[in-house]
Image (cartoon, rainbow, N blue to C red):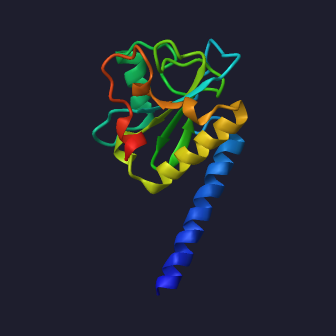
């Protein structure tokens, strides 16, 4: 029985990797609410990890509405990618400037994780795969993959301390 369970877990793991690679390969509107940016960056020096701070499940559309209507961000999303329910949602083109971290909006790719999914295995796996794909694409050193809270002049944010330490 244990052997069957191990085989099934490997199959699920392989399927997750294939789904993630497919999502990265198609690399377009995975949410139906993709937003074109007004500004694009020439260089990418950082990957910045965020969490959305939600204490309960919310829709991707709700995050967009919050950013647009409460934060006042024209584009509606402060991130290039959003990870939720084990899926990768591309919110902006990968080279778009986003409203994700003061002073880093036009030299970083930003990834946000839906807070209730922080311990979801598929979400964690997709984060690892996405970060590694972006590191390869832009030749970003591991030291430049940072949490929002690791950057200077970001105010009193804890974002996303638990992602990087748990």
Foreground residue, 104 or 80?
104
Q: Is residue 87 left or right of residue 56?
A: right
* Residue at image location 39% in from the left, 46% down from the top: 118
Asked if residue 43 can be seen in this view, the reply is: yes
Position above or below: 105 against 88: above
Q: Quadrant of residue 18?
A: bottom right
* Residue at image location 52% in from the left, 17% down from the top: 75
Q: Is residue 128 left or right of residue 54?
A: right
Q: Is residue 78 left or right of residue 131?
A: left
Q: Quadrant of residue 155?
A: top left
* Residue at image location 36% in from the left, 36% down from the top: 161
State the image coordinates of residue 85 (x, y, percent, origin top left). 45, 49
State the image coordinates of residue 22 (x, y, percent, origin top left). 68, 49
State the image coordinates of residue 62 (x, y, percent, origin top left). 39, 31
State the image coordinates of residue 14 (x, y, percent, origin top left). 62, 63
Position above or below: 19 against 62: below
Position above or below: 24 against 147: below
* Residue at image location 66% in from the left, 41% down from the top: 133
């Amino acid at each position: 029985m244990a052997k069957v369970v191990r085989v099934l877990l490997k199959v699920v793991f392989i399927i997750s990797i294939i789904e993630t690679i497919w999502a990265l390969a198609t690399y377009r509107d995975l949410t139906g609410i993709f937003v074109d940016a007004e500004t694009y960056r020439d260089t990418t020096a950082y990957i910045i990890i965020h969490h959305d701070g939600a204490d309960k499940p919310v829709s991707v559309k709700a995050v967009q509405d919050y950013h647009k209507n409460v934060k006042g961000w024209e584009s509606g999303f402060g991130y290039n990618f959003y990870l939720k329910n084990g899926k990768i949602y591309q919110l902006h083109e990968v080279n778009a400037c986003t409203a994700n971290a003061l002073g880093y909006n036009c030299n970083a790719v930003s990834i946000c994780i839906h807070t209730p999914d922080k311990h979801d295995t598929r979400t964690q796996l997709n984060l690892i795969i996405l970060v590694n794909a972006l590191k390869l694409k832009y030749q970003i050193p591991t030291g430049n993959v940072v949490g929002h809270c690791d950057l200077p002049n970001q105010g009193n944010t804890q974002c996303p301390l638990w992602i990087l330490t748990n």
